[in-house]
Image: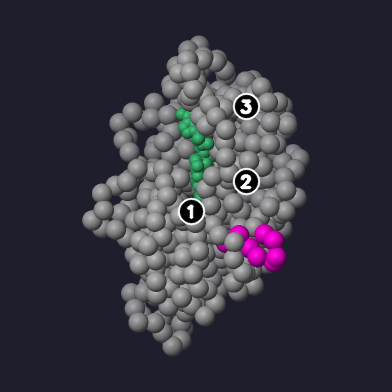
């Protein structure tokens, strides 16, 4: 069996490693000629860390990222709403890893090159389209420098080419641009003194204005590379294109978040000191009724672009890769394998897309804002522990993240 993967992001590279692990021939086509460590922070949930560990990357992850131990949800004044253990502290056998997205991508890329050979990673090659005939697929790529075309035939094509997937566009030609939720995200990563215990992720605010802050790596002198995101509703703003690397001036961010200074976190100073701040619109796409079409399927953001709530996108792309590989390894019929993968993964991911539009596991923050907009003396008077547990547990179950499931499920692929 020969598989073409288009897109060398977190999902496509995890798939290439997984296919290689079970002896399936794979070639990756990535549009960017020289992938750089782009992006800021991303979180890998224990279920995804388990999969990368079973691919032999556990030590590299632990060295590069931070094993996050706690998640705190706060209101806009920094008052604590909910505090929960994460990763190892929550009883998982694998940590939650917060990591620089670009470092993670390059770590995966190095492993892919070593294992499947440089010749099977074609960079600077953009998928333009494909056709299916006689149970096989013929893909057309264009060289980003010369513009010349290259064709390759395979048994399977996997579109892991992100939110602007060319593969998805071919099977859903009328879908158009991603859905803008009238919110903007400003993001940066900066070296800073640890806040709290140096292993905590904080989300504060409410639906219309919130921050997410967490460390993603160690730097010299006991400092930590600290990821911050400021998100706010911009009702009158026209949709902006989704470029991951569009920079924005700090004045805009500072003026919106100048009051977000808590005894344990000085956000305005972090913003002030940040050199590169990126602006990204809050976007997703509607759930679709199928990912697999004959011998072509979609994976990761190409299949289920979701709002970045609950730290899911990277982890779920890795889970897609493992599920798809298992389905391919267990049958000689590629089309049946792709249908099985679709049936196993799509319903849950479609559910998460919709849950994330309503703040997913962070919905408690909006309830607290509505009930106590000026703050509170005792959180128990505003929201009960039971209500908090229902919200967070319901999301964890939907996303396949509850501790017992992750710890006790069999491996997707025998290590
Ligand atoms: C540059 C960049 C920066 C990001 N920064 C962050 C971040 O800071 N925090 C965060 O949480 N998420 C970030 N993301 C998104 C995050 O990586 C994904 O949501 C998640 O990891 C799922 O990964 P994916 O592999 O499905 O998609 P992606 O990570 O988006 O990867 C898709 C890959 O496909 C390539 N590609 C696109 N079109 C084609 C084509 N036609 N042919 C061939 N290749 C193609 C892209 O260059 C990219 O490498 C970023 C994505 C990108 C591309």
Q: Which residue is mark 1?
A: 276
How many angstroms separate mark 2 from mark 3 (CA)? Answer: 17 Å
- Whether the residue under disc 1 has CB within 8 Å of ligand 1: no
Considering only vertical position in the picture, is 141 above or below 275?
A: above
Residue in the picture at 54% in, 57% down: 189
- Whether the residue under disc 3 has CB within 8 Å of ligand 1: no
Q: Which circle marks residue 104 in the picture?
A: 2
Q: Which residues are magenta?
A: 219-226
Q: Position of residue 396 (x, y in %)?
A: 54, 59
Residue in the picture at 65% in, 65% down: 223
Q: Position of residue 226 (x, y in %)?
A: 57, 61
Task: Tell me the element at label 2.
Answer: helix
Instruction: Say whether residue 31 is magenta.
Output: no
Q: Which circle marks residue 121 in the picture?
A: 3
How many angstroms separate mark 3 from mark 1 (CA)? Answer: 30 Å
Q: Quadrant of the N terminus?
A: top right
Q: Nearer the viewer, residue 157 or 106?
A: 106
Q: Nearer the viewer, residue 335 or 245?
A: 245
Specify few, some or many for label 1: CA neighbours under 10 Å numbering under 14, 14-19, or 20 or more.
some
């Amino acid at each position: 069996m020969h598989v073409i993967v288009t897109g060398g992001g977190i999902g496509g590279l995890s798939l290439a490693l997984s296919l290689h692990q079970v002896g399936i021939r794979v070639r990756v086509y990535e549009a960017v000629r020289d992938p750089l460590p782009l992006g800021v922070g991303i979180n890998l949930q224990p279920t995804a860390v388990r999969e990368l560990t079973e691919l032999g990357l556990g030590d590299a992850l632990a060295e590069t990222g931070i094993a996050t131990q706690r998640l705190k949800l706060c209101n806009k004044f920094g008052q604590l709403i909910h505090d929960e253990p994460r990763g190892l502290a929550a009883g998982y056998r694998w940590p939650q890893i917060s990591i620089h997205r670009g470092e993670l991508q390059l770590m995966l890329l190095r492993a892919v090159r070593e294992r499947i050979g440089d010749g099977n990673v074609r960079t600077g090659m953009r998928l333009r389209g494909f056709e299916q005939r006689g149970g096989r697929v013929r893909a057309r790529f264009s060289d980003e420098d010369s513009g010349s075309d290259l064709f390759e035939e395979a048994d399977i094509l996997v579109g892991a080419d992100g939110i602007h997937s060319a593969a998805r566009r071919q099977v859903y030609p009328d879908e158009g641009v991603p859905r803008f939720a009238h919110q903007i995200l400003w993001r940066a990563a900066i070296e800073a003194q640890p806040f709290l215990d140096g292993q905590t992720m904080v989300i504060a605010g409410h639906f219309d204005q919130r921050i997410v802050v967490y460390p993603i790596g160690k730097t010299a002198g006991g400092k930590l590379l600290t990821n911050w995101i400021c998100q706010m509703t911009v009702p009158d703003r026209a949709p902006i294109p989704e470029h991951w690397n569009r920079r924005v001036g700090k004045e805009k961010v500072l003026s919106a978040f100048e009051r977000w200074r808590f005894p344990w976190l000085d956000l305005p100073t972090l913003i002030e000191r940040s050199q590169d701040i990126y602006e990204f619109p809050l976007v997703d796409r509607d759930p679709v009724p199928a990912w697999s079409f004959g011998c072509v399927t979609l994976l990761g953001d190409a299949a289920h672009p979701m709002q970045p709530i609950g730290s899911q996108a990277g982890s779920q792309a890795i889970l897609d890769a493992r599920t798809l590989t298992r389905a391919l390894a267990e049958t000689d019929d590629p089309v049946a394998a792709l249908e099985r993968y679709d049936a196993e993964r799509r319903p849950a991911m479609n559910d998460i897309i919709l849950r994330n539009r309503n703040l997913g596991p962070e919905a408690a923050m909006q309830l607290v804002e509505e009930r106590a907009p000026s703050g509170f003396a005792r959180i128990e008077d505003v929201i009960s522990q039971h209500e908090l547990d229902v919200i967070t547990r319901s999301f964890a179950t939907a996303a396949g993240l509850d501790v017992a499931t992750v710890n006790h499920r069999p491996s997707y692929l025998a290590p």
